Image: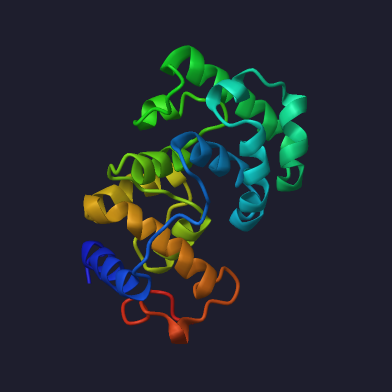
Amino acid sequence: MTKKQIALSAVAALKKEYPDAICSLTYTDPLQLLIATRLAAQCTDARVNMVTPELFSRFPDVYSFAEATEDEVAPYIKSCGLYKTKSRDIVAMAKKLVEDFDGKVPDNIEDLTSLPGIGRKTANLIVGDVYGKPAVVVDTHCIRITRRLGLHELKDAKKIEFLLRDLLPPEESNDFCHRVVLHGRAVCDARKPKCEGCCMKAFCKKKT
């Protein structure tokens, strides 16, 4: 099978296995998803979802975050880890949104990655989930599983993103990435993948 054929087979298999391809972070608007994704760095989505209700109750919009200090935000996110860095980024991000984007979350990768603490992974998530544009969210699950499938031998997330943009149908790419996360958690574990029960075992290159 070619890499394109493997990618299309993976799209079909994961769609059947995980029909509901949704982000596991809880949010009600673009800003909340942007902040929740920043908090999720080196932290579980479940933990972030426990923290954000109180955080967003205290700071309900971009202006309240922009007017806050790092010390005011920090106590609400302490359990997410790296809270000093994250609180600094959140406040700085909100200020830039107010100053440069009229308080609105941008709809493109270039503007999103100009925000403090926001990389391509988060930018793609916003572009795909909020604005419905083709996006490829490359996280550890995506890197691991697409490598095991034989689609690449890369380590650089940006290179993997552009490779997958070429291999995946644009309208399927965002949901594919959500399904890869679900599959990585349930089946394709980093240490002990459950290959015998994998929906992609017929064409996966990993033989364990």
The outermost residue toward the bottom is 196
Q: Is residue 101 visible?
A: yes
Residue 180 percent coordinates (x, y):
42, 63
Residue at image position (75%, 47%) is 79
Residue 15 percent coordinates (x, y):
31, 69
The quadrant of the picture occupied by the N terminus is bottom left
Residue at image position (46%, 43%) is 121
Q: Nearer the viewer, residue 194 or 88?
A: 88
Say whether residue 77 is left or right of residue 3. right
Relative height, residue 114 to residue 205 (above, below): above
Say whether residue 203 is left or right of residue 89. left
Relative height, residue 47 to residue 9 (above, below): above
Q: Nearer the viewer, residue 188 or 185?
A: 185
Residue 207 percent coordinates (x, y):
44, 80
Residue 160 percent coordinates (x, y):
39, 49
Residue at image position (34%, 57%) is 175
Where residue 57 sits, quadrant-wise, is: top right
